[in-house]
Image: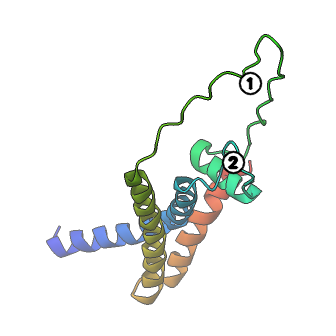
């Protein structure tokens, strides 16, 4: 087999595998960006309640299911466990570097989604059979959805 044939086979394999997995890459990059910023959860003392679709995306990302866990039951306050006068545990101080890292990962996730979408556009514009390109992207969207909703 000639070197040019091998390179062409690698390019074609790369194109169609990339198209097949592109929808999942975009989904996981987007849901990961939301998770790194903490938009999928409520924190103690906050009035923020995340939208259900963000919680469901995070659940798919973390647990590969749409089944949301039951909310944790609040413990009833009793006299034996009364901690009103007990000192509050101190929350460790978060360094500024954590926020910078969160921002970096957030931007990286958005860039991954954007470059993946650009790859899909390039696959349609620069060669290859458009029908196979469409089928690969469609299969990449429908297969995980079918599994998720079975």
Q: Image quarter for residue 122?
A: bottom left
Q: CA separation, marks 1 and 2?
A: 23 Å
Within 10 Å of disc 1 (Cα), the crowding (few <14, some 14-19, many 20+) is few
**Circle nearer the viewer, 1 or 2:** 1
Residue sitting at the far top: 80
Q: Position of residue 119 (x, y in %)?
A: 43, 77
> Which quadrant, please, contains the N terminus?
bottom left
Q: SS of the residue at dot 1?
A: loop
Residue sitting at the far bottom: 125
Q: Position of residue 17 (x, y in %)?
A: 43, 64
Q: Tell me what residue is drawn at x 37 percent, y 53 percent.
A: 97
Between 101 and 135, the one lying in front of the other is 101
Q: SS of the residue at dot 2?
A: loop
The mark nearer the N terminus, 1 or 2, is: 2
For disc 2, the marked residue is: 42
Q: Is residue 37 above or below residue 117?
A: above
Q: Is residue 33 above or below residue 90?
A: below
Q: Position of residue 111 (x, y in %)?
A: 43, 71
Report how many numbered discs are placed on residues in the image.
2
Q: Is residue 47 above or below residue 69?
A: below
For disc 1, the marked residue is: 84
Within 10 Å of disc 2 (Cα), the crowding (few <14, some 14-19, many 20+) is few
Q: Tell me what residue is drawn at x 55 percent, y 66 percent.
A: 23
Q: Tell me what residue is drawn at x 52 percent, y 54 percent.
A: 36
């Amino acid at each position: 087999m000639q070197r040019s044939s091998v390179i062409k086979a690698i390019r074609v394999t790369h194109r169609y595998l990339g198209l097949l997995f592109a929808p999942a890459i975009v989904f996981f990059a987007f849901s990961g960006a939301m998770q790194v910023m903490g938009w999928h959860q409520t924190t103690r003392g906050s009035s923020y309640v995340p939208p259900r679709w963000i919680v469901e995306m995070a659940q798919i990302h973390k647990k590969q299911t749409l089944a949301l866990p039951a909310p944790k039951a609040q413990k009833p306050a009793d006299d034996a466990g009364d901690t009103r006068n007990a000192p509050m545990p101190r929350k460790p101080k978060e360094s500024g570097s954590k926020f910078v890292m969160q921002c970096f990962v957030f931007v990286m996730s958005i860039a991954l989604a954007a470059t993946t979408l650009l790859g899909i556009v390039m696959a349609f514009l620069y060669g290859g059979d458009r029908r196979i390109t469409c089928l690969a992207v469609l299969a990449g969207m429908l297969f995980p959805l079918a599994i998720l909703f079975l």
